Amino acid sequence: MEGTAQGLARGLTNYGDADFSVYLRRSFAASMGYSQDVLKRPVVGIANSFSEFNNCHRHFPEMVAAVKRGVLMGGGLPLEFPTISLGEVFLSPTSLKFRNLMAMDTEEMIRAQPMDAVVLMGGCDKTVPAQLMGAASADLPAVYLVAGPMMTSRHGEERLGACTDCRRFWGKYRAGEVSRAQIDDIESRLATTAGTCAVMGTASTMACIVETLGMCLPGTAAIPAVHADRLRAAEASGLAAARMVANPIRPSQIITEKSVENALRVLLAVSGSTNAMIHLTAIAGRLGIGVSLERLNRLSDETPVLVNLKPMGSAYMEDFFFAGGVGAVLRELKGKLHLDCLTVTGETLGDRLEREGGYVDRRVIAPAAQPLEPEGGLVALFGNLAPRGAILKRAAADKRLFETEGRAVVFTSLADLAARIDDPALDVRADDILVLQNAGPQSEAGMPESGYLPIPRKLSAQGVRDMIRISDARMSGTAFGTIVLHIAPESAIGGPLALVRTGDRIRLSVAEKRIDLLVDEDELARRRAAFVSPVPPAGTRRGYDRLYATEVLQADEGCDFAFCRPQVGPVNPAR
Ligand code: FES
């Protein structure tokens, strides 16, 4: 029965009598008030990541109702199930640590429960990659439905959108340009509707990537969370998932080498979040597809920046939606894209773009012939400080700092940073390079979004707005500055970043795509020999914390768990 079984007859609970298992399951399902006719339908699961610890998903109950309507229209039985939710700002030490847990939850619940297709509902930063990673591994027909972005708000005459403006105003407050009363007033105006952050942060970048990959319905990535079109998209997503039961298209047919390359192009053209590199690498890795930083650089050299959204530009996601959204960007990039990639609708990307057209607001989405920047928004750096790579969002950085040699001012941990950054006695100048160690994936910090080191208060008070900052941490997609991130291998396991000392010279060259520590090899060898990892031994940790510490991969491998990838390596008996 297993191979051809449909609906509630799929994936039976094992009692040693398949017919009894079906009988029992139907009778228990009937207890929820379903008729026998409805219980015979194919089942469309709805992976709902609603949580009261996730403001970005607060409209999901209304969206779920619309998805269910669509599934019923398509002849399916919609069955909603909860998964872990990851509300970006509610998680400690950082949401990335739990992305893989959500991916495992999603994968296993898709696999374990009887469903023929699934609608994945997420949006806040890590939820989208987590669900796509899980769905890719489960490989059941799936349609993604993103939360959609928040609407902007106002403070006086200024538009406010989470969370680039959160950082902008906090920077002004630290510099004494905004009063305590003003910052308190702004606090309640930064995030005023349901939905994900209003700029091209990680959530919006991942939504654009989902649409480019072909895992959601065309045109749905940028619809504001509170717009009626979002509910129509939900209904259509439910209908599409129900239709996929008869014509199954699996994530492994959609997420391919070619569609991943298309996604990288769009990431570069929208000048998206640096986090998206980690997430796309992890998603692709679930299907055995490699995403190298060298490949990113090759694509970045020939992919222009087209989208004028914060944090790089001036517009917000609602403007992007009305300007033409992802479709308009894809049409501009058409000549560089693989058009034969399949999407959840069954049509190819090329089919889609052939049929689409219409108004494009050129203030928000530039034509490829007149791009905002000739090269992509992200660039990978290599060198003796980052043998396996690092990343810089060059479109959101200060070009005057691109070719710099400076003195390192080192902070050995987040606690050290917090203790000293605003110390009036801190020996730091505007042309120094701030270095943060021990904030990578295996560190106790868990690779938080703390790569956006604050400008020391005594310098920000003098008007310094940007400095080169270097770390193995991440940065919020809503942040900006000349910030080198994701250095691999990380310092906590002895990567070269661990060897930097205050007073060393560091050279950054964006033109050469290099980041180097200018210390002679003998001295580095001495420091390497004296290195002691601050990571507590695995034996002193327990539960998920231990699993994470022992299995998480480095940033250039997407920070996935090694054992979740298709090819599992040899088991280490010491673990
Ligand atoms: Fe959820 Fe920004 S906090 S997307």
Image (tube, rainbow, N blue to C red):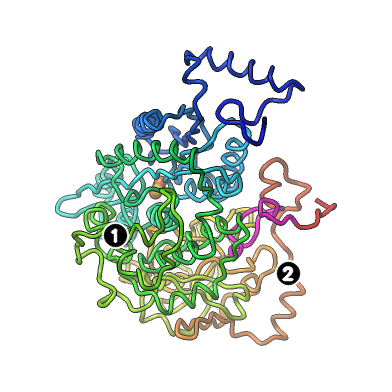
Mark 2 residue element: loop
Q: Nearer the viewer, residue 214 or 198?
A: 214
Q: Is 394 in front, or is 255?
A: 255
Residue drawn at point x = 32 percent, y = 55 percent: 199
Q: In which image quadrant can residue 109 be found?
A: top right
Viewer-closest of 151 and 288: 288
Q: Earlier in the sequence, mark 1 or mark 2?
A: 1
Residue 495 at x, y percent in the picture: 66, 70
Please name the residue shown 61% across and 43% down the image.
104
Crowd rating for badge 2 (residues with CA inside 10 Å; few <14, some 14–19, many 20+): some
Establish if 536 lies above or below 52: below
Residue 264 shows in the view: yes
- Residue position marked by numbered label 2 in the rendering: 531
- Give the quadrant of residue 465: bottom left
User: What amino acid is at disc 1?
Assistant: Gly
- Distance from Cα at disc 1 to Cα at disc 2: 40 Å
Whether 145 is drawn above or below 310: the answer is: above
Question: Which range of residues does the magenta coloring cover?
Answer: 550-568
**Disc 1 designates what residue?**
176
Count neighbours of disc 1 (C-alpha within 10 A) and say few if under 14, some if 14 to 19, many if 20 or more.
few
